[in-house]
Structure formats: structure tokens, C-alpha cells
Image (cartoon, grey):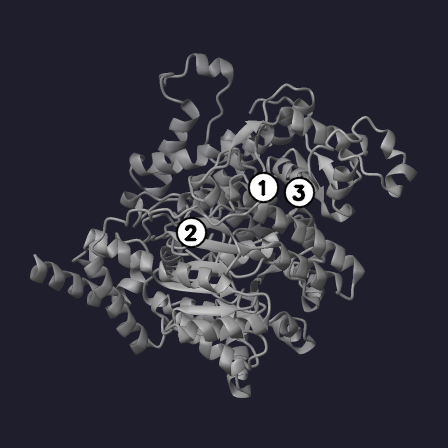
Amino acid sequence: MGHLSELKGVEKPVTEWLSKMGWSFKSNEDLKTYERPFSKPIIEQILVEKTALINKISEEVAQHAVEMLMQNLNNPIPILGNEAFLDKLVSGVTERYIPKKYRENYVLKPLNISNMTSYGSLWMKCYHDLDSIVDLTTPLKAEAQAEEVADILDVKTQEVKDMDQLMTGSDVYLNSVVGGDDALVIMPTGGGKSLCYQIPALVRSGTAIVVSPLISLMQDQVEQLKALGVKAAYLNSTLEADEQAGINDALQAGKLDLLYVSPERLMQYYFQQSLANADIALFAIDEAHCVSHWGHDFRQDYRALGQIKSRFPSIPVIGLTATADTATQADILTQLNLHAPLVYKGSFDRPNIRYRVMSKYKAFDQVVAYVKQQEGSGIIYCNSRAKVDDLHAKLFRQGFRCAAYHAGMDSDERELVQRQFLNDKIDIVVATVAFGMGINKSNVRYVVHHDVPRSVESYYQETGRAGRDGLESEALLLFDEKDAARVKQWIEQGEIAERNQIELQKFAAMEAFSEAQTCRRQVLLNYFSQFSDSACGNCDICLDPPKMIDGLVIAQKVLSCVLRLSQQASSQYVIDVLRGKQLRRLQEAGHHQLSTYGIGKDKSDSYWHNIINQLVHKGLIRVDITAHAALRLTEAARPVLKGEVDVQLAVPRLEFKPDKKKAKQAPANYDRTLFTRLKHLRKVLAEENEVPPYVVFSDATLVDMACKLPTTRNTMLDVSGVGQTKLERYGEAFIQLIDDYINREH
């Protein structure tokens, strides 16, 4: 500890306390004659020895525990590092990565001061290849919870693009929530968002209350959790009175790990009274963007959820969303009334999804030609019920296994379609946005937008239904200006003028994506403030790149104009000035006298719109949706204005053309015949257990089986997505099939 200011308040009391426990304090003078060689870190070596002695373990295991402990000293702010170190010295190491060889018995506490005369050790069994994430300073509900956590992680691995990144990045978050803190989680669909409340729910004492906006989503989540052996349930209108009473009894008795409810039910007085008498672990608000006035899917019934924190101030509240721009994020924190929350933002990149935009010219022919080239399940989104019905009828007549889905259908019809889709009895669902948040099918291979969505958030969330198993998938958008004009007209007809303006600004960003001539993944990521300088190589722009030019002077014209308009003008106003238009509003404001007036008159409105969009995508300009879409310069614009950096821009493509046909990527190296047989077995087992096939195993897991050919229980556990519970439930059947296949075929 290096700061003199810490001497009186930290060092002296701590050293005195440790001395009373039998430790000795070595001054600098003492260390000069200390018997231990300086080749070993003295403090670390003492900790290793004491940990081994106290817990009666080998120094090898103790060394690993101390290494974990010492990681807390790596904080750039010394006092915070010291504070963390002392806390862990007393309360124990919060384990992140447990090596296989220490998995059965692993000491986590260098010191245990709960009993000054009898030092106990804290042990935990872990069964997961990747590593369990638990804060063991909070008591587990039962020993079995460790296995449940591991199985959840096993299943979710196949849906998370980068599990290592999630494990590392969410360590602080999980520790914080398990410790009782509020949090906001912003992670993409398929990014492991549900882990962020499921794991704390299993670790913390009590029942986690999960707020979900859709009955179908509740049912799907509970179905999957029950398959893993987790005690989960839901309360909604589909249940009979006696069923609801039974679930309430289980809640009061502490027999549930997770309980899913609607926002309306959570706000009911009698239900809150019931919660007041129960042991509640946490509240999780899924689809938290619905609380925000700025969010793309605002819902009035979500607005009251901020009262929960006032009603239950000591219980952590977690908001979770897959899409939230800066304005929405700030509003969620305010609306949910979160107390000093930790904001955890995961990567929005879904690298396995290929983004394509095609000019819409013969939409039905385009859809048919595209779908015929695809394998597996797909979703086709349309902007109206009439289009859904029309397109579904035409596809059905062409022989496709498809169904329609929209809010004009009764609930039984919609539920049937969803179940058929989840159970692989139909391949394509033609739908409005009503077929959205409740879809959790891991093997959707493609998503087609027949019409342009109303916002980037909606587009991102809907395309995120594809490729949740991590396998190669595609998102195709058919775009034309007529569709865009119709969407603008619908928005302008809204009853709330302020809301209309917000939606128009969001749609402008969607248009910019559709018209982009730079990497589409960059555009998406930049919209969510995850700025990327490198192209993805997996979108239509990257596969068929536009011509690039030196755009420094062009960029300077735009940036200078924005600056001279005091960063208060919209895109169109900036363009009007650049083109030197003879407009009364310009002259009344005196903007016809600006030095940038008319410097871009040789180019069209469309040209400058495209250039401005490119500058937004590059992070040089941002659109402030809270100030009537005013263009603001970012800090990155400063060196551009000074001419200190190069700017590469794409030559605007003012006419959209269909993408050139590209050969599909080479298939993964696995036995496709075996894969087909594994899928058939999965279907049989799913029907026997009355669950969707992906609940048994995902496509990604079957692909891994077809690659690794496991024929024993141990080798089956090496397959991605196979945990102890799944192994016990389904493993033997798949092992037998693979063994028979190898012996018969080879």
C-alpha cells in the first residue's frame, strides 16, 4: 500500500488486526535482513503458505487461490486495488475460472474469519468445461445449484457468439448483482442476455421475478429451464385458477428459482402483497426498452415498473434489453428508478449473420428465388397484415411449408403457428412485427424483410432471430423509396406529435442503413455506439465493394457547414445550405451569407444525403434525436477539419441494383449424413418429451456431434451444448446412434 493518506485509515488498523490473528508485520528495515530470498514475492509467498496451512491443502492449489486474489491489485487506482484485495482477503475469492484439475475440490478463501479459532474451508463442485461464474461470498441455495448453473451455461454456449468474452466481461456485473446491486444489461439477441439474470437467480437466495411482455416468451423460457432441471414457472392468463394458486403457494414456500410474470400482473396490488411475504432474489425487467419514451417499442404498461424499486428498495432490479441507443439507455435508468446501477453493455456484433440489401423490383420473384437457395427455417417480415396474407398465399401455392402470423389472427391461431414453427413442422413464417420478441428458435437460418422496418432497433432485433446457434445465417432487406415514403406517412399520422418526431428520426437512420455504401455491419454497430474502423467482410458491401475516393475536402465541406450552423440544424437544412437553395427560411436566418452557402451546388440532394450518412457511420457526426435530429460533431471531426487525417469515402451509388450472386461459403467439415440422422433422432425425442427439437439439442450441437463423433459419456460432455443434465436425459440415445453409425458405415 503506497499512499500516505491510507496509513492511518487503512494500513495501521489492518496490520494491527492481522497481528492479533498471529500474522507478523515486516517493515522495510526488517525486510533487509529477512530470511526469505527476494527471488520470491514475499507477501504472495506468505499468503500461499498460510492458505495451504489454514485449509489443509497442497501449496499448488493454494498458489492458484492466491493468484486469483492478487488479481485484485491490478487496479490502476491504488486505493481501489487495495480495497478489493482486503475485501477478498476477508470474504473470499470470487472465482471466475476453475481449472479442470481443481474442479472437484477448490479452496476459495485464503482466510475465513467467521470463526477465529476454527478456520473452515469453502468448497464447491463445478462441472462445466468453460467455467462457472458465481460469487461464493453469497451462500448458494443448494449444492445442486452449481450443476444447474453449469447446465445453463452449457446450453447458452451455443447461442453466444463469444462465450469467453461474455464470461470475462460479465464477471464484474455478476458479482455486483449477486451482491445486491441494480443493473442495466444491454446485449444483443443471442448474446447471452438471459444468463445475466438466470445465474444470479440460482446463486442468490429466494425466487427471481422476471417481467416478460409476451406469454409465448414466458412459456418458451420456462420450458427450456425445466428441461435443465431448474425450478421455473410462469403466471399468466392461460392458467386456470387452481394452477395459479399452486404457483403462488410454491412462491411462498420458496420452491421456485424463477417466476415469469407480465408487467400488468407485477403491478397488481394483491400480487405485490404476495411478493412482500415471499423471499425474493431479484427483479429482472426483460425488454426494458419498452419503458422508454425514446425506445422503438414503447409500452404504456411498462411505465409503472419504476415503482417496484420504491416498493422493494433492498431487492436488486435488473433491466435487460437487446437494443438501446444512448437516449433510450439514459431514459431506462430514469424510468426504472435504479439505484447506482452498473451498466453492462455487450458487443452488438453478430458475425455469423450476413447482411444484404437488394433494390426491390419484383418482390415476390425475388423472395421465391432467395428462399429456394436457403436451407432450414426462415422468417419473412411484411409491414401490413394484407401483405402477409397475400405473400403467404402465393408462397403456399408454390409448395412452400409456410404459415401467416399477425395480430389480426386469434390467439389460438397464432399459438398454433408458433408451435408448428418451433417444432419444425413448417419452414417459413410470413409475419408482421407481431412475430417478434417471443421467438426463441435457435436454428432460424435467414430473415427476409419484404418491406423496410421503422427503425434500426426493430431491424436489428428482427434479424437477430437468425443464427442464434452461431451457425452461418443471412438477413435480406428489400428496399425501395416508395416503401420508405409509405412508412413516413404512417408515422406522421400518429396521434402524439412528439412521438412522431422521434419515430421519424429513427426511420431516417434506417433509411441511412438501407442506402449505405460502407460496410453494413459498421453502420449497425456505430448506431449502437460500438464504433468500428474495420469492414466485416460478410455483407453485400464488403463482398461487392463500391469505389473509394479521397473524401477529405468533401467531408470538410459538410463538417464546416454543420459547425457554422452552430450544430443546431438537421441533415436536410445542412444540404439546403450546401446547395445554396433560395429558401425564405435560409435568408431570414441569414444563412445565405455563410461561407459554406452554395459550395456543394454541383451535387444533388441524394448525393449529400449519402455523404452525410457516411460521415455519421464513420463516427464524425452524430444525430441528436433529442434535439429534432440536429447534427452534432464528434471529437473525431476535429482532426478532419484541420486536415490532419485522411478520409476515405465511397462514391455514392444513387441507383440500387440487385446484389451479384456469390458462391456460398464452403460447408463446415462434418458428416452431413450423420447430421441428418441426428436431427431425426432429436425430432423423435422432442415429440416423446413434448418439447421443441432445439430444446433437446440445437443444430450447432448436432453439428459438433457429427464432427467429434462421441461414443462415450465423457466424450459426449466435450460436445458444445451438452451438460450433465442433457447427458443424463438424452445422451445415451445419441451415443448409441453415433456408435452404430460408425460401426455400420466404417
Residue 633 horizontal side relative to residue 365, left or right? right
Could you say which is closer to the camera, residue 22 or residue 412? 412
Residue 484 horizontal side relative to residue 432, left or right? right
Q: Earlier in the sequence, mark 3 or mark 2?
A: 2
Q: Is residue 508 above or below residue 286?
A: above
Could you say which is closer to the camera, residue 601 or residue 514? 601
Give the CA separation, mark 1 to mark 2: 21 Å
Q: Earlier in the sequence, mark 1 or mark 2?
A: 2
Determine whether the residue tagged by mark 2 lies in a helix, strand or loop: loop
The residue wearing badge 3 is 606
Q: Which mark is residue 316?
A: none
Give the CA separation, mark 3 to mark 2: 39 Å
Q: Earlier in the sequence, mark 1 or mark 3?
A: 1
The residue wearing badge 1 is 526
Q: Label 1 neighbourhood size at 10 Å, few (<14), some (14-19), many (20+)?
A: some
Instruction: Please say whether residue 307 is visible from this viewpoint.
Output: no
Hey, what amino acid is under mark 2?
Val
Q: Residue at x 27, y 49 (%)?
A: 668
Determine whether the residue tagged by mark 1 lies in a helix, strand or loop: helix
Hey, what amino acid is under mark 1?
Asn
Q: Is residue 679 above or below residue 539?
A: below
Residue 181 horizontal side relative to residue 331, left or right? left
- The quadrant of the image that shows the N terminus is top right
The residue wearing badge 2 is 160
Determine whether the residue tagged by mark 3 lies in a helix, strand or loop: helix
Hey, what amino acid is under mark 3?
Ser
Q: Residue at x 51, y 35 (%)?
A: 85
Residue 116 locus on image (x, y percent):
47, 44
Residue 585 locus on image (x, y percent):
88, 42
Residue 71 locus on image (x, y percent):
46, 33
